Image (cartoon, rainbow, N blue to C red):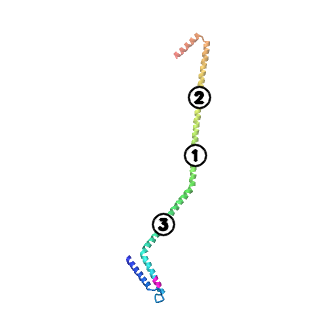
Amino acid sequence: MSRYKTIGIALALTLLAAAAAFASDGHADEGGQTPGMNLFWRLLNIAIFIGVLYKLVGDKARAFFTGRRDGIRTELEDMETRKTAAERRLAEIQESIANLDAERKAILEESKAQAEQLKSVILAEAHKQAEQVREQALRTAENEGKAAIEQLRAALADEIVAAAEALLQSKLDDAQHDKLINNSLTKVVLN
């Protein structure tokens, strides 16, 4: 049935019920309608009104409530999905928190091992440098000692030469002096 036909039938039934209601004068005991018949017409009027209302608004109301129900269902499913994701994330975070202590201990152990290794490297380098400084000091002392001995020898040699020269000059006369120079020159030339 088309929509206009339905509206027309509903309007006709409403008018018929209204005509019956106007026909009664409102006194059921004086030959009018009985109270049972009055109730019947009222119930029929309500039924027609509900029928017309259902025809006009029923599909839209059904679509609204169906859509609302589907929306609520979708929202509940979405919330359930988010709840599952949140629980999974919570479990990951709790596991991460539980692992933090182990990770902290591992990092501390690794840091201690690195510190010990660095300490041993630094100590080895310090011992090496100390040994180099000691050897250099020994070489320097040895060189300075040799230099001091050489200076002492040179000074001693100069003093011996000076003393020998003084002794020779006091004991040699000119003839012995010339003879000594000639012998020295002869040795130097022949060698």
**In this rendering, is residue 145 above or below 177?**
below
In space, the residues marked 3 and 2 are separated at their CA atoms by: 96 Å
Image quadrant for the N terminus?
Answer: bottom left
Q: Residue at x 52, y 60 (%)?
A: 89
Label for residue 75? Answer: 3
Give the mark nearer the N terminus: 2 vs 1.
1
| Contact, mark 3 vs mark 1 (Cβ under 8 Å) | no
**Image coords of residue 180 (percent x, y):** 57, 13
In space, the residues marked 2 and 1 are separated at their CA atoms by: 42 Å
Q: Residue at x 42, y 77 (%)?
A: 52
Judged from the image, the secondary structure of the residue bearing numbered disc 3 is: helix
Specify the amino acid type for callout 1.
Ala
Q: Nearer the viewer, residue 91 or 120?
A: 91
Majority secondary structure of magenta residues:
helix
**In this rendering, is residue 90 above or below 69?**
above
**Image coords of residue 60 (percent x, y):** 43, 72
- Local packing at callout 1 (Cα closer than 10 Å; few below 14, some 14-19, many 20+) is few
Residue that carries the numbered disc 2 in the rendered image: 144
| Contact, mark 2 vs mark 1 (Cβ under 8 Å) | no
Residue that carries the numbered disc 1 in the rendered image: 115
- Local packing at callout 2 (Cα closer than 10 Å; few below 14, some 14-19, many 20+) is few
Label for residue 152? Answer: none
Give the mark nearer the N terminus: 3 vs 2.
3
Q: Is residue 121 magenta?
A: no
Q: Nearer the viewer, residue 22 or 122?
A: 22
Displayed quadrant of residue 50 = bottom left
Judged from the image, the secondary structure of the residue bearing numbered disc 2 is: helix
Specify the amino acid type for callout 3.
Glu
Give the mark nearer the N terminus: 3 vs 1.
3
Which portion, as a residue range, is magenta?
38-42
Residue 49 relative to residue 122: left or right:
left
